[in-house]
Amino acid sequence: MQLFYNSNLDSSAAQFVFPQEESKHIIRVLRKKENDILFVTNGKGTLYETKIVVADPKKCKVQITNETKKHQTKYWLHLAVAPTKNNDRFEWFLEKATEIGVNEITPIICERSERKVIKQERLQKVIQSAMKQSLQTFLPKINPAISLKEYLNLKHEGLLFIGHCEKEEKVELKRRAAADKDITILIGPEGDFSTNEIQSAYEKGFLPVSLGRNRLRTETAAIYACTTIALINNS
């Protein structure tokens, strides 16, 4: 099964046309023809089964033959992660977190961040590709980059955690977290959060958690956190 994505699809649609670039891929590269079946999601939980009615590499048209609505997870995982200096590593994190299961991601700019500018459109494409590859019907939300200070001043609900490298008493994430709960986890840059940033997070209700015994890179810590929450909710 190969999955395609079209954010504009809804239950009122009977047919739709793929953009030219995707139409060319479907017809020229995948060699699809009329009456072949394609599966499409709108990223909002619905899987559409469609049939090609016009096999045109410039405007491939399909007819919707069936739709299945999937259920959202009972929990909401929000990862607020500092972008890495190497952009490829941050994109790798986005890809793997989407495959494992994350609902929302916010790039946070910290005092020690080495990368302070990100390309939102590029990150969106990475997430879309990972969603399709892993055959999911919910597209994670990727927010614009924001400073940690601004982020902490937003309203936060559910279980709030921060992973940092400062030497202090911490409880393992798997013991702090719980199934079917909304969870937000802060992950800092390569140089870690500053002491002031950690204190500010504490004042906003974030609790320190341990992400294992080893010192982890930013993207590894984020994947560790994502995997831990997925295991808790799927055990």
Image: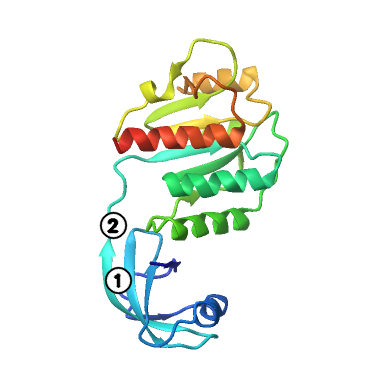
Which residue, as the protein is rendered here, is positioned at the far right?
Answer: 114
Please state which of residues 116 and 25 is positioned toward the viewer in this rendering: 25
Residue 103 visible to the viewer: no
SS label for mark 1:
loop
Q: Nearer the viewer, mark 1 or mark 2?
A: 2
| Snapshot quadrant of residue 36 | bottom left
Identify the residue at horizontal 62%, vertical 57% (top origin).
122
Return the disc, 1 or 2, that comes first in the chain's sequence.
1
The spot of residue 32 in percent (x, y) is 45, 82
Identify the residue at horizontal 49%, vertical 10% (top origin).
169
- Check residue 90 in the rendering and tell me which mark sits there, or answer none: none
Q: Are marks 1 and 2 in contact (CB under 8 Å)?
A: no
Residue 235 visible to the viewer: yes
According to the picture, the residue beneath numbered tag 2 turns out to be 70
Task: Look at label 2 and name its amino acid.
Answer: Lys
Task: Look at label 1 and name its amino acid.
Answer: Ser
Q: Quadrant of the N terminus?
A: bottom left
Left or right side of 4 for 122:
right
Identify the residue at horizontal 71%, vertical 39% (top origin).
85
SS label for mark 2:
loop
According to the picture, the residue beneath numbered tag 1 turns out to be 11
The spot of residue 35 in percent (x, y) is 35, 86
Q: Residues within 10 Å of mark 1 (few under 14, many from 20)?
A: few
The spot of residue 126 in percent (x, y) is 56, 55
